[in-house]
Structures are given as structure tokens and as C-alpha cells.
């Protein structure tokens, strides 16, 4: 080996090393200087525990329960363990393989000292031989990773393990946002239910006045029937609102990993919650706060290393094997110097014809890399889109709520005046019905607009990454179970890899 192989092997290794080097390149995605919908940031970027800014003890309790018992989060944690196991499996190829062997054998052989007529004449006899062998030893094998195939496979597994951790953070953020969204919806339907009940009480009060006038002969049967129709319509909306409120409350059970009967939080009102302001910051900074983007970067690195491993498979593999031990015919002589055995061998295996399998694996790896690269670029644009959409929704729902609040106040004042004039007999029932209907619709719309504003702010927190920030330094250094520098030189955060 030392005399014949070094020069060819070293020359080929240098050529392959040049062929499989990866070079970070910028993604072909334009990063804007500012968000389109940004008018002026007020507040701070999202921080860990951002949901506490809504000042809802029930929401805090539900989110903590979800982070501890949600099934999707538990599955994401299990995927992390699987990915870590794959790192250990892939890393095993970089180390020697050592096995202990032992055995014992016995063979009985019968021998004839004579045959045929000779045996008859000489009175031949039968004899037998017993053969025993005892052995004990160690076998070792090691593949020299000249071309970096095993190193690339382990680097791919490390990147996949980092992807699983970023994916878990994405799941955490999604679950947290879903719990908050579900809770806000339950509160909004509770508000609409309160509005419907209050409006029903007002309509019933008006109906009582009209019936009194009808008894006195100052109102007709048509006026009574019109108000009764309005009362019936308001009463009919209550079951539907209660149904929706209960549906959202029941949905909290699945999000927290508990049966619906275990949810003891009852919806109150959105009016008691705060709306914590948040700053969008710069688009370039957003890329460091989105765990889904970081996950795709890790997967992109993993696919790049898969290409390196597929390339290295074209070149010969060098296998070293060795064994040492003892063998003897008697057990008491097994460990004697005379029974010692040792061997060392080297082998080289090179692919000559495989029907295109190696080429197919390389093209498959390249295709997977291109797929993830496209998804990675899409995720960047999607992140900018999410923030702009959330900023736009927040701005216009804030404006709409203020205007709708004014509309409610105006409608309430008109309804109060109409009821007073009806009691005085100066207006007819049609005017009262119109003003009451306008008030009821305005109050219900206000509750829906307020929910839309909360959802817009929640969407902005989610679009900004929910307080998550990318770990500094080599990615694998920030995760337990993955040793820093496991990839040669440390795996820096790639924004695209030239792995063609």
C-alpha cells in the first residue's frame, strides 16, 4: 500500500476535493429596504413570551398548557430525537468497526486401516480421529474516507438535525398563534352574544311600550307585529352565537392536548385585553427572526452535502481490515504464544459499470437541492408578504374600528331619541324599528372589527417570528447533542450553496 497507492490516491483526492467544495452564494431574491406597508414603527420587536402583552391570564395559561401538551409539538420533539439518532448512525462510518469473535468446534472422523481383500487378509481394523479447535480474537475494519463521502453524509445528517430543531420552533410558534387566535375568536363571539342579549332586552322593552300603546288604542296591530318580528329575529341569533363560542372553546382542548371537558377557561370580552404595539423593523433583519427560513437553510445545506456524498460515490473506496487473536486445539493452550494469529489486509473497490445508478443518485440529489432552493426563495418572499399583509390589516382595522365605534355611538343616540319620541307619541314605530336595527347591526359589526384588529396584530407577531432569533456562530454549536465543529470548519449559515 505504501509503495503503490499514495500518488494516485492523493492526486485523485485533490481533484475530488476541488470538485465537491461548497461556496456560499447569495439567493436570487430581492430584499427590499423597507416594508411596503410600514408607515412608522412604534414599539419593540417581538420578544419571547410576546403573548403576555395582551394581559390575559387565561390566554397565558392556555398557551403554557399547549406548549407542554400539544401533540404536534410532541411529534416535533420526537423528530428531533430521530434526527439525532441519524447523526450517530452517519457518524459511525467515520470510525473503525471492531468486533470480538470466539468459537469452538469439534469434528469426528472415522478411518479404515485396510480395504477390500487386503483388509480381509490382514485382518484390518477401524480407527477414528477427533479434532478440536478453540479460537478467540478481534476483527477490525475501517474505510479510509479519501473522497469525503462519509464526512459529507454525517454533515448532511447534522444539517437535518438542525432542520428538525428549527422546525420544532416553527411548530411552537404556529401552536401559540393558533391558541391565541382561537381564544380571541371565542372572546369575540362572547362579545357578540352579549350585544345580541342586550339588544334583545332593548327590543323587548320597546315591544312592551308598543303593546301598552296598543292597549290604549294609540298603536295598531301592525306596529305590534313589526316589533315582535324584530324581537324574534334577535332571539334567533343567540343560539348561533352560543354555538360558535362553544365550538372555539372546545377547539382549545385539542390545541392543549386535553379533552374539551378539561378546559375551564370561559370567554370574557376582548375589551379587557391590551393591544401591545410591535415594530416590524427592517426586511433584512426579518430573515434572522423566522424559524421556517432557518429550517429551509439547514435543509438546503443537508441537500448540498447529499450532492457531495453522491459525487464521492463515483470514486474508489479503500477498506482496511485486520484481525488478531488466538487459536489452539486445546483450551488450556488457547492463550499461549504458539496460538497467536494476526492478519492485516487492504482492499480497493472501484465502480466500473452499475447501469447508471450512481449517475441517477447524483441527479436525484441535485434535483432535491434545486427543489429546496426554490422553496427557500419562496419562503423569503412569503415572509415579506406576511409582514406587509399583517401591517396593512393592522393599519386599516385600527382605522375601521375607530370609525365603527363612532357609528355605534351615533346609532345609539338615534335609537335613544327615537324611543323617547315614540313614548311621547311623536314618531311612528317604523322610525323606531329602523334606528334599533341600525344600532344592533352597528354593535355586532364593531365586535367583528375588533376581532379582526386583534387577529391582524396576532398575524404581525407571527409574521415577525414571535420573538425567535437565530443562534449566533456555527449552527450546530447551539444545539445539545451535536458537537461544535462536527462539520469541518463549522457549518456557517448558508444563504445558498453552489453544489452543482
Image: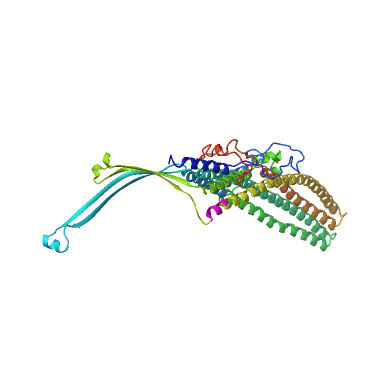
Magenta-colored stretch includes residue 383: no
Q: Which color scheme does this rendered protein use?
A: rainbow
**Residue name at image x 80 percent, y 53 percent:** 438
Asked whether the viewer can see residue 419, the reply is yes
Res 356 → quadrant: bottom right
Residue 428 shown left or right of residue 474 in the figure: right
Figure label count: 0
Q: Which residues are magenta?
A: 356-362
The residue nearer to you, when weighing 411 against 321, is 321
**Residue name at image x 78 percent, y 57 percent:** 207
The residue nearer to you, when weighing 306 against 400, is 306
Where is residue 186 drawn, in percent x and y? 66, 50
Residue 235 shown left or right of residue 163 in the figure: right
Where is residue 487 drawn, in percent x and y? 54, 39
Where is residue 181 drawn, in percent x and y? 66, 48
Res 454 → quadrant: top right
Residue 193 shown left or right of residue 291 in the figure: right
Magenta-colored stretch includes residue 359: yes
Q: Main secondary structure of the magenta part?
A: helix
Q: Quadrant of the N terminus?
A: top left
Where is residue 458 drawn, in percent x and y? 68, 45
The residue nearer to you, when weighing 491 against 84, is 491
Q: Outermost residue toward the right?
A: 426
Asked whether the viewer can see residue 267, the reply is no
The residue nearer to you, when weighing 460 against 236, is 460
Amino acid at each position: 500500500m505504501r509503495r503503490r497507492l499514495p500518488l494516485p490516491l492523493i492526486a485523485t483526492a485533490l481533484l475530488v476535493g476541488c470538485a465537491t467544495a461548497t461556496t456560499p452564494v447569495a439567493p436570487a431574491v430581492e430584499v427590499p429596504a423597507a416594508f411596503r406597508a410600514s408607515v412608522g414603527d412604534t414599539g419593540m420587536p417581538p420578544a419571547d413570551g410576546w403573548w403576555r402583552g395582551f394581559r390575559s391570564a387565561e390566554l397565558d395559561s392556555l398557551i403554557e398548557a399547549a406548549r407542554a401538551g400539544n401533540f404536534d409539538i410532541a411529534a416535533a420533539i420526537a423528530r428531533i430525537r430521530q434526527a439525532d439518532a441519524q447523526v450517530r448512525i452517519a457518524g459511525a462510518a467515520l470510525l473503525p468497526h471492531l468486533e470480538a469473535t470466539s468459537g469452538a468446534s469439534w469434528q469426528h472422523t472415522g478411518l479404515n486401516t485396510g480395504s477390500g481383500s487386503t483388509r480381509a487378509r490382514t485382518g484390518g481394523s477401524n480407527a477414528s480421529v477427533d479434532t478440536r479447535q478453540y479460537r478467540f480474537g478481534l476483527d477490525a475494519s475501517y474505510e479510509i474516507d479519501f473522497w469525503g463521502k462519509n464526512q459529507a453524509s454525517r454533515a448532511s445528517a447534522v444539517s437535518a438535525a438542525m432542520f428538525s430543531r428549527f422546525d420544532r420552533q416553527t411548530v411552537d410558534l404556529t401552536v401559540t398563534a393558533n391558541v391565541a387566535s382561537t381564544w380571541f375568536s371565542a372572546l369575540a363571539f362572547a362579545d357578540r352574544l352579549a350585544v345580541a342579549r342586550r339588544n334583545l332586552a332593548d327590543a323587548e322593552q320597546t315591544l312592551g311600550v308598543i303593546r301598552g300603546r296598543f292597549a290604549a288604542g294609540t298603536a295598531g296591530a301592525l306596529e305590534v307585529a313589526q316589533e315582535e318580528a324584530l324581537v324574534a329575529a334577535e332571539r334567533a341569533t343567540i343560539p348561533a352565537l352560543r354555538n360558535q363560542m362553544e365550538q372555539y372553546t372546545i377547539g382549545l382542548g385539542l390545541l392543549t392536548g386535553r379533552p374539551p371537558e378539561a378546559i375551564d377557561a370561559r370567554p370574557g370580552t376582548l375589551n379587557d385585553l391590551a393591544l401591545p404595539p410591535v415594530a416590524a423593523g427592517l426586511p433584512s433583519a426579518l430573515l434572522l427572526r423566522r424559524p421556517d427560513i432557518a429550517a429551509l437553510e439547514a435543509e438546503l445545506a443537508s441537500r448540498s452535502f447529499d450532492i457531495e456524498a453522491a459525487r464521492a460515490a463515483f470514486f474508489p473506496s479503500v477498506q482496511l481490515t485486520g484481525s488478531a487473536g488466538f487459536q489452539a486445539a486445546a483450551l488450556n493452550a488457547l492463550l499461549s504464544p504458539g496460538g497467536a494469529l494476526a492478519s492485516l489486509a487492504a482492499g480497493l473497490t472501484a465502480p466500473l459499470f452499475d447501469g447508471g445508478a450512481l449517475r441517477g443518485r447524483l441527479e436525484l440529489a441535485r434535483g432535491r437541492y434545486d427543489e429546496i432552493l426554490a422553496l427557500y426563495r419562496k419562503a423569503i418572499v412569503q415572509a415579506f408578504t406576511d409582514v406587509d399583509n399583517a401591517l396593512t390589516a393592522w393599519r386599516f382595522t385600527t382605522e375601521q374600528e375607530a370609525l365603527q365605534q363612532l357609528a355605534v355611538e351615533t346609532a345609539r343616540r338615534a335609537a335613544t331619541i327615537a324611543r323617547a319620541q315614540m313614548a311621547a307619541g311623536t314618531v311612528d314605530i317604523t322610525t323606531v324599528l329602523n334606528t334599533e336595527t341600525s344600532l344592533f347591526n352597528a354593535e355586532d359589526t364593531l365586535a367583528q372589527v375588533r376581532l379582526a384588529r386583534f387577529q391582524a396584530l396576532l398575524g404581525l407577531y407571527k409574521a415577525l417570528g414571535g420573538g425567535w432569533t437565530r443562534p449566533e456562530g456555527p449552527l450546530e454549536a447551539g444545539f445539545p447533542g451535536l458537537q461544535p465543529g462536527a462539520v469541518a470548519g463549522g457549518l456557517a449559515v448558508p444563504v445558498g450553496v453552489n453544489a452543482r
